[in-house]
Image (spheres, rainbow, N blue to C red):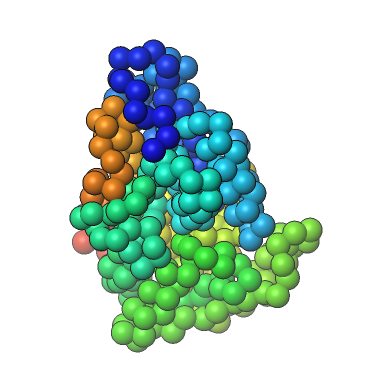
Amino acid sequence: MGRISRLPEQPQPFVVVLPMWDSPPGRPLTEGFVKKMEELGYKEGIDIVYKRHGFLAPGPETLGVVRGIYESDLTEGIDLIFAAEWSDTKAAQEATKAVGKPVPIVFADITNPIEFGFAETWASPGANLTGVAERRNDVVEKSLELFTGIVPGIKKIGVAAQGFMLPGEPSISYYEALLEQAEKMGLEIVEYTTDVPPGPGYREEVTRVFDSIQKGEVDAWLHIPGHFFTNQQTLEHQLALRLKIPHMLPAVEHNDETGELVGLFVYGADFVEKGEQAAIFADKILRGGTLASDIPLELPDRYIIVINLKTAEAIGVTIPPEILELADRIIE
C-alpha cells in the first residue's frame, strides 16, 4: 500500500504527487489542496514533500506521458497521489495497477465515478481511490434552470463540440447530460466543430471558427469543460461580447493571460474549495491510517452562483433581482 505504514511520529515526510493536467481545474485544485494540508499541520519539507512535475497541455498523447510519470514515482516510492480530474485519475489508476502498488489516490473533480469505474459505490468506493465527485445530470439541470431564468427567451445555445472537447472526461458526460436536459427544456444545442487536430495552428483554427459565428445563429453560449486549447474560455467570452449574448460556465474561469474572470454566469463548485475538501481525505489516509476504500465519496461541500455585472452591462442584459439574491459572488 505504498509507504504510509510508518508511524506518524517518524520524521520522514510523506511524499505526495500533485496534479499534472493543465486543464482549468488543475491549478486551483492544487492551490486549495496544498493550502488545506498546511492548515492541517503538514509543513512542506518537514511533514510532507510534494512531487511537482509541472502542468502538461491536454491531449490524447499526454495521458500516456502522465501515466509514465506516475509509474516512475510509484517505483521510487510515494505515499499518495492527488489527482485533479478524470484524465489524471485514470492515468494514476492504470499506473498503480501496472506497477502493482495500490498507493491511495484522492481525486477532487470526478463526475459519475461509478459509471467510469473509479468506485464501486458512493458509500464504499473499494480499491485504492476516493475523493470528491459529482452527479453530472443534477448539476447540468440546475445550471440550465438558472441560466434561462437569468435571460428569459433563450432557445438556441451554442457550444464548441467535436474537435474542441477532450475525447474523454469531463467533456463527454457533461455534453451528454446537456443534450438530455436541453431536450427536456425545449432548448436547441447548436454544435460548432473542427477537424483540425491539436498542434501547430490549432489556436488559429479555434479563432477562425469563433470568428465565423454570426449574430442570430445562437441566443447564448455554454462552456463545455475539458478542451484542448487551454484558454478557450477567453475566446468564448470574446465571442459572447461580440454577439452580445449571455455566456455560462460550469466553474469560475479566467483569462489565462490577464487573470480577468470570464463569462456572465457561473454555477458550479469552486475548485479551490474542492481541493481543500480533498485534503481532508488525504489527511485521513496519511495520518489517520484509513484505507481509501473505506472512505465514502463526497459531493462538493457547496455549489456557488457567480454573476458578472460587468459582462451583463456589456451585452445589455439586466439580471433579475431574485437571481442576484441567490448569487454567492457578484462581479461589478
Rendering coords of residue 251 (x, y %): 41, 54
**Residue at left offset 24%, top offset 58%:** 122
Task: Work out whether residue 103 can be spotted.
Answer: yes
User: Dividing the picture into quarters, in which one does residue 152 lie?
Assistant: bottom left
| Residue nearest the viewer, comparing 1 with 50 | 1
Rendering coords of residue 108 (x, y %): 38, 47
Is 260 rendered above or below residue 53?
below
Rendering coords of residue 39 (x, y %): 31, 24
User: On the picture, is 54 further left or further right than 181?
Assistant: right
User: On the picture, is 270 further left or further right than 314?
Assistant: left
| Residue nearest the viewer, comparing 38 with 259 | 38
**Residue at left offset 46%, top offset 76%:** 157
Task: Work out whether residue 332 can be spotted.
Answer: no
**Residue at left offset 63%, top offset 61%:** 60
| Residue nearest the viewer, comparing 290 with 186 | 290
Is 217 rendered above or below residue 324?
below
| Residue nearest the viewer, comparing 280 with 217 | 280
